Image: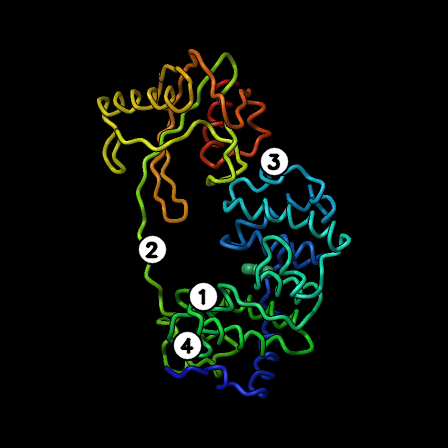
Amino acid sequence: MADEHVEEFDSRDLAQMRKKIASWFRNAQRDLPWRVERNAYRVWVSEIMLQQTTVQAVVPYFERFMKQFPTVEALAESEEADVLRLWEGLGYYSRARNLRTGAIQVCEQFNGQVPKQVDQLLEIKGIGRYTAGAIASFAYNQPAPILEANTLRLFVRLLAYDGDPKSAAGQRQLWALAERFASCRNPAKVNEALMELGALVCRVSAPQCDACPLKSSCRAFLSGRQEELPVLQKRIAVTRVVDACVAIQRKNKWLVRQRTSEERWAGMWDFPRFSVESVDHDGKLTPAISRRLHEEVRQTLLRDWNVTAEIHDDLMEVRHTVTRYRIRLLALIANWQEGSPSDGEIRWVTTQQLAELPLSVTARRIADWLHERHTS
Ligand code: ADE
């Protein structure tokens, strides 16, 4: 494999490619809320939300977030729980916590101005090389490179790079091409057009090469390998787990606990939740197995939560996936009898109060169910 693919394009090729994508972008770009009233704060928030999340899912979250926290100062003055509540359902909640910490940092360290320079942006919590490049180029028109999922795929195909794009050698070459693309008079346009082309045309499967303004320069297209590249990495094995989650009722209140910084969904509130062994990941929940589950849950609540409770119902079953975990979650309802957890951040709250707390997605489903049942 030739190591220096980037050299395959000279500066005239690059200039022509920039021109073609800029003209394509004028007609093809989507109307997205972070593309209007553009400023560094809006770019920053949108790019953090867009990490690991689709554009479609992000749009309503972005709009709600901007309504509540329209400026970096507003975010810096927020309560973490309010930020998490707005982020609920987007996942990867450390992004929200870091964004808030980053806003505080911008106010304290940079006088409330999101910096222009990539090296200063990189000092901010949660901002990596890609996000720094996106803010510097989109908001300030700095010639900063960007490499993320869309441009990575596009560059791999342009170069017909057949190594692992995540390897050190792959990253070096792909960033080098990103840098060459961005070294121009209008990096804001060029970078955004590259990303949009990756998202809309140079798609993961069934790339729309006929509609691509760069097809005559694309090494993968010219050799018919666009469907084979990028070379897929081995998938990490999934782990199957079974969890129980118990809504424990004491008069009109429910027991919730805030998840700690060492746990997944840190800062979010949840009903008591833990893994169980009496149910298989894929087996049927027969009455006998359900009885065993209740007994296991009762014992775990007593041992680990200092709560005696009588389990009286299977509420719902949810299957969900979090990173490499495939989770079967069994939600139960119980009546409190005695005791209360002595450590951790614990509250007994009404269903109305549940509406205000940031909850894990599954806890929100349970809370909605409880709310409906108790108000109907
Ligand atoms: N994916 C990541 N950043 C994006 C952006 N600014 N617009 C559209 N899709 C994106």
- Nearest to the observer: residue 266 or residue 37: 266
- Considering the image in quadrants, where does the N terminus appear? bottom left
Which of discs 3 and 1 lies nearer the camera? The answer is 3
Query: Regarding ligand 1, which quadrant of the image does it lie in?
Result: bottom right
> Are dots 3 and 4 in contact, CB under 8 Å?
no
Residue 203 is marked as 1
Q: Earlier in the sequence, mark 3 or mark 4?
A: 3
**Residue type at the position of mark 1:** Arg
Taking the spot 37% from the left edge, 19% from the top edge, the residue there is: 302
- In the displayed structure, 222 sits above or below 300; it is below
Report if the beta carbon of the residue with label 2 is closer than 8 angstroms to ligand 1: no
**Residue type at the position of mark 2:** Ile
* Callout 3 secondary element: helix
**Residue type at the position of mark 4:** Tyr
Q: CA distance from mark 3 to mark 1?
A: 37 Å
Q: Looking at the picture, how far across and down is residue 365, in whole percent?
A: 46, 32
